[in-house]
Image (tube, rainbow, N blue to C red):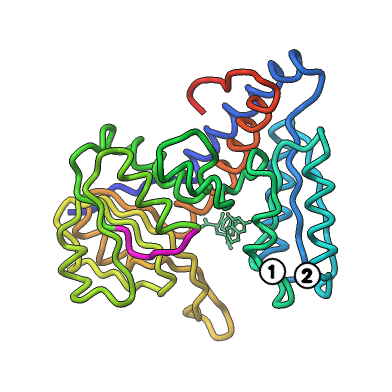
Amino acid sequence: MSADRIDGKAFAAGLRERLAAAVPPFQAKTGRVPGLAVVLVGEDPASAVYVRSKGKATIEAGMASFEHKLPADTSQADLLAVVERLNRDDAVDGILVQLPLPKQIDEQTVIAAIDPDKDVDGFHVANAGRLAVGQQGFVPCTPLGCLMLLKDKLGNLSGKEAVVIGRSNIVGKPMAQLLLGENCTVTIAHSRTADLPAVVRRADIVVAAVGRPEMVKGDWLKAGAVVIDVGINRVPGAEEGKTKLVGDVDYASAAEVASAITPVPGGVGPMTIAVLLRNTVVAAYRRAGLPAPEGL
Ligand SMILES: Nc1nc2c(c(=O)[nH]1)N[C@@H](CN(C=O)c1ccc(C(=O)N[C@@H](CCC(=O)O)C(=O)O)cc1)CN2
């Protein structure tokens, strides 16, 4: 079998077009466009790239982008003061503090300070709780993007066996909740799971979010499984001194067994930013007391 390649980049581009189309009706009703504030602390090069991409994508969708770049030695109190200002700013519908944060700052304290109704990352405990009990809130962008790709590929997920490898608060746990919400039978596996290949082999759907380059091999998979690779690992490339990006799944061997698989890059990664814009548009509609457009 040679698996279908799930093109997250193309899906994300379509979603971004639909989001851009939702902006003018919002502006006509409210006199303003949805606004996303992104806060970057320090100079981590990868974070700087992601923040730039988020700002560019926000503007391309016709929305307002507010970038706050703070020095690496910013104190927690100063960052909290920025978050508080953004919470009170009516032009800001979504607030995102780029992770990871420098060592002197406690991530959970900062996330807890964000107004849950502006928490477009979906990381606040209020939003984690809402997801767990099936209430309306905000869902973290990467797992929601994975779910969109899965539903686009498979339609109804009800009754499928799903194995999520990884138990982070940002991907693994919300991913499992989302799949449960779709009536999948869900197993969360992790680094201490006994006989991980045997557990993964049960799955119709595998979501790999473990942060280990090419760990999941083709012979771990049930024939025809759909594989979503959340990993973004930079490893040495074929040429001396060059690097390349690989996922948590060994694409070549997995594509021999799976029916469909996301590539890295170009799979889940582009969905993260598209869903961030989606959450911001939804936040803007909700804050204005308007129903969010269908199909976002
Ligand atoms: N506050 C947040 N911080 C971080 C998040 C997040 O969702 N919220 N996620 C990651 C980084 N991230 C967005 O911030 C992100 C990661 C990867 C991609 C992406 O498009 N990846 C491309 C490859 C990019 C490359 O060449 O390096 C792909 O997979 O195709 C987008 C966003 C951590 N921090």
Q: Residue at coordinates 83% horizontally, 54% vertically from top-left?
A: 82
Tell me which corner region of the image, top left, top right, bottom left or bottom right, holds residue 100.
Answer: bottom right
Q: Name the side, left or right, on which 85 lies relative to 127.
A: right
Q: Is residue 74 magenta?
A: no
Q: Name the side, left or right, on which 258 lies relative to 266.
A: left
Mark nearer the N terminus (2 vs 1):
2
Q: Name the side, left or right, on which 3 lies relative to 71.
A: left
Q: Residue at coordinates 73% horizontally, 31% vertically from top-left?
A: 34
The three-letter code of the residue at mark 1 reads Leu
Of residue 256 and residue 23, the one placed in the foreground of this image is 23
Marks 2/1: CA distance? 8 Å
Question: Mark 1 — residue?
Answer: 101
Q: Quadrant of the N terminus?
A: bottom left
- Tell me whether the residue at label 2 lies in contact with that at label 1, contact meaning CB atoms closer than 8 angstroms: yes
Of residue 165 and residue 150, the one placed in the foreground of this image is 165
282 in relation to 219, above or below: above
Q: Secondary structure at mark 2?
A: loop
Tell me which corner region of the image, top left, top right, bottom left or bottom right, holds residue 57.
Answer: top right
Residue 66 pos. (x, y %): 81, 45
Residue 195 pos. (x, y %): 18, 75
Say few, some or many: other residues with alpha carbon within 10 Å of mark 1 (under 14 / 14 to 19 / 20 or more): some
Q: Residue at coordinates 63% horizontally, 22% vertically from top-left?
A: 21
Q: Residue at coordinates 30% horizontally, 44% vertically from top-left?
A: 180
Q: Secondary structure at mark 1?
A: loop
Magenta segment: 164-169
The three-letter code of the residue at mark 2 reads Gly
Residue 154 pos. (x, y %): 27, 37
Question: Mark 2 — residue?
Answer: 42
Q: Main secondary structure of the magenta part?
A: loop
Q: Quadrant of ligand 1?
A: bottom right
